[in-house]
Amino acid sequence: MTRTQAFIICVSALSTNAFATRTIYMDDVVHAGTGISAASPLNTLKLVKTKVAELVRVYPTEDIVVKIAPGLYRGPQQIVSWSETEVNPARTVTLEASDINSRPIFDGEGLNGTRLFTLNYTRGRSNIVLRGLHLKNWVNGVAFLGQRDDDASANSTNEITNCIFENIGNAYYRGAAPKPTGFSAIGLTNSDNNIIRGNSFINIINSEGGSSLHAIYAAHNSQNNIITENKFTNGSGSQVKFRDASNFNTVDSNDFNGLPAKIPAVQHSYCDQAHRTPEQSPCTKTGGECPSQGTVIKMNSYGGVDLFFENTPVYQPTNTSCFSSTPIPVNQYALIENFDTDEGGVDLMLSSARGFAS
């Protein structure tokens, strides 16, 4: 063997290893296996979490894919909170349906006030992918959480695609009183550069505190996220909400249907203590909140929706740290173009043009 041939073989081996994938198998079988083959699957997300942490530690240069078989997954052992032990910033960890035509169903049964999947990570790229899953009967669904009060402590570059979120909110809660508040099917806190694509949101409803619940709620410096090609059907609050310096996000080619009168499909908001009335609770974030800027809303359809965008509140913030120079004109908070009303249409494009008067 020549030195050149040996070099080529060595490089080929390194290249193959660099793009290798480790697979974990999950099924709704009664007895859990090792997870290393379809014949010996794990049966809960808690066991998957432990296995993922092991593989991230042992194989840091390899992607990890969790193949989840069709079935019904229930109970507290399916509720997980992931952190740095399950995250590989250099590679991707994917939880996906093994058969996209028969999605695994994670049923909260209306008995738990929490959510199925939470990512608590503040060190940048987290690279979590959720694909082809079906969540139903939860008060909240999925959340990617960075540090709310520290802009630099974010997570990023996650993806949620082709999932179904059905019956999310306290309207479906069957546990002990009082009812917990539902906030989001997908929640982002200081979470950037995510893609939320091709999902269906069906019945995202709070029976108490209806306007507090959103299909997608991006808050506290969640920036440069893409929300595209999703379908929203029935909700009690605005389906997409941006709060507190969640800048430069795109809402593109989505289908919005079935909102109460005067509830906007897309909403901006932030809390400014100087403008709170005595009956309103105080802002909770240290240092105050800022408006979101640079939202792009384009090529969406709004069948049967009264209001497609609302910017509230309408005043300039008293928090001077919100702007590096002069305050941005209010009419630059969002760019709305090429909207498609669909049959039924949008009766009211903007709430009295709120947020668009210079």
Image: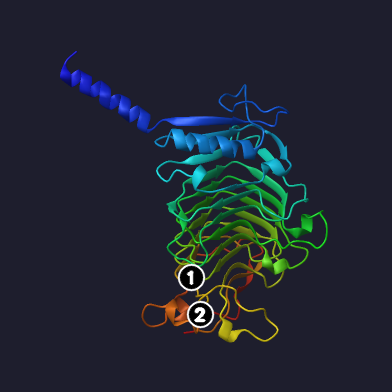
Residue marked by disc 2: 356
Left or right, residue 71 beside residue 299: right
Q: Residue at x 45, y 31 (%)?
A: 21
Point out residue 232 in the picture as x, y percentages from the top left corner: 64, 56
Distance of mark 2 from mark 1, alpha carbons? 17 Å
Left or right, residue 237 beside residue 319: right
In the rendered view, tell whether residue 217 sits above or below residue 349.
above
* Tally of numbered discs: 2
In the rendered view, tell whether residue 54 sits above or below residue 31.
below
Q: Secondary structure at mark 2?
A: loop
Q: Secondary structure at mark 1?
A: loop
Point out residue 85 in the picture as x, y percentages from the top left corner: 50, 44
> Cβ–Cβ below 8 Å for labels 2 and 1?
no
Q: Nearer the viewer, residue 206 or 55?
A: 55
Residue type marked 2: Phe
Q: Nearer the viewer, residue 72 or 111?
A: 111
Q: Which mark is residue 245?
A: 1
Q: Quadrant of residue 217?
A: bottom right
